[in-house]
Each structure stands twice: as C-alpha cells, then as structure tokens.
Amino acid sequence: MAKKNWLKMGALMVFAVCGISMYEVAQAQKQDPKHPPVAGDGSLVVQLCDGKTNVTVPGVDPNTRLTKEQAQAVSSELMKLWMTKQDPAVAARWMSEASRSAAAEEKKPEPASGQTGNQAQEQVTPVSPRDFMIWDREVAREVAYGDQIFHDDKLIGSTNGIACAMCHPNASNTHPETYPKFQVQLQKVALLRDMINWCIEQPTRGKRLDADDPKMRALEAYILSQRKGVPMAPGKH
C-alpha cells in the first residue's frame, strides 16, 4: 500500500513539474519580442517601433550612448527607410502631420486657467473657479513632465541616446485616440502604454515602465494632450 502511495505521489510530482514547464514556455512566448541582436561585427543595431526596420551604427559598441546628433541621424535614417516601404499616400500623411505638429508647437497658447463656458455646461456637480484652476494646474504639470521625458533620452531611460521625439516630433503620428488596437509587432491588442513600452525597449533600448510609474502616467498625459479635440477611434489603423 505504501509503495502505491509513493508511486502516486511521484506521478503527481512529475505531472506538476511538466505543467509548470509548459506554463513557463507559454508565458515566454507571450513576451514582447526584443530588439535585434548586435550586428555581425558587434556594432549597435537600432530597431524602429514597427519591429522590422533597423539600422546598424558601424563601429559603435551596443553599450555606447550616441551623441544627440548621432541619435537624431539614426532616427532620421530609420524613418527614411520606413517611408520607402510605405504607400506614398501614407508617407505623405505622416510628413504632413509632423509638419502641422511642429507649427502648432511654435504657436502654442498659454495654459488656460479658471472655469470656461464649456466646462460650466458639462460639469454637473457645482464647483468653483478655484477648483478648475487647481485641476488645470495639476494636468498642466503632468503634461509638462511628460513633454520633458518625451524629449530627453536620459529621462526615458535610453541606453543609446535616442529620445522619443527624434522619431515623433511633438508626439506627432502617435495617434493615442486609436488605442486600444491590434498591433502586429506586439501580436496582441495594445493599449497606449503597451506601445510606449515597446518603443522604449526597441529604438531607445531602455527598460519598460510599470503601468503606474509616474513617468508612464506623464508620457500618456503628454501624448494625449497633443491630440486634444481629435475624436476617439479605438481600433483604427
């Protein structure tokens, strides 16, 4: 009888180990793909957030941080390569949005403060002008921090000197209003924060941020603020 019990326990342990191994393999397969390995000569390889386009930086060690000028040159080359693979109409729309974004940035108005007519109509619970002033101030603070992170390679955690703004000036062509949507390179339905992390891990070769990380919250606030007034279109490509 004791022998049978030991056999049963042994069989259960083997089954459990196999189950855990299968689970770990499945989880590993779910992980987002990582940036490409180094080039054949050991040089740095930088991959665009489409998961396909990449540029080799000859003679640069993968652990070396590029200068701002070098990083911008690599980003521009990545975008140039990506453009050549797109339909001309798609490429034209991308360039047009980037240009509009740059123009809008130059004539950006001062942050509004106090209660506006629209806010008074939309707000059901009675609030004071002071409430609106505080809310506007806090949102503006979050957006400003996100703006700073988006344009600073060190704040984003980049290990190669590339910053988000080098490919997406003023958050152009990020289209946060289209999330959630299925992203081929992630092989899943992605939220805006998923795509932010993908871009951090790919072009900048940094470490992903937790969903509640202050930097992630600020980045989402900044990117969304740049599309203020654009209708929501979840799933749109």
Image: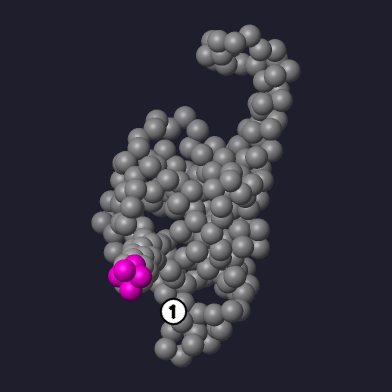
Q: Is residue 179 left or right of residue 228?
A: left
Instruction: Tell me if residue 2 is in the magenta stretch.
Output: yes
Which stretch appears magenta?
A: 1-5
What is the chief secondary structure element of the magenta stretch? helix
Residue pointed to by mark 1 = 37
| Callout 1: SS | loop
Q: Is residue 37 left or right of residue 150?
A: left
- For this orientation, the residue located farthest to the right is 130
Instruction: Tell me if residue 186 is in the magenta stretch.
Output: no
Say if 59 sits above or below 72 in the image: below
Q: Is residue 36 left or right of residue 237?
A: right
Image position, residue 85 (x, y; %): 29, 64
Q: How many marks?
A: 1
- Residue drawn where x is 71% and y is 25% of the image: 134
Image position, residue 107 (x, y; %): 60, 38
- Mark 1 belongs to which amino acid? Pro
Q: Is residue 7 left or right of residue 163?
A: left
Say if 10 sits above or below 96 in the image: below
- Residue drawn where x is 67% and y is 20% of the image: 132
62 and 24: which one is in front? 24
Question: Is any part of residue 83 visible from this angle?
Answer: no
- For this orientation, the residue located farthest to the bottom is 41
Image position, residue 224 (x, y; %): 51, 39
- Residue drawn where x is 35% and y is 35% of the image: 233
Image position, residue 95 (x, y; %): 40, 52
Say if 218 sits above or below 49 in the image: above
Quadrant position of residue 54: bottom left
Label 1, residues with CA under 10 Å away: few <14, some 14-19, many ≥20:
few
218 and 150: which one is in front? 218
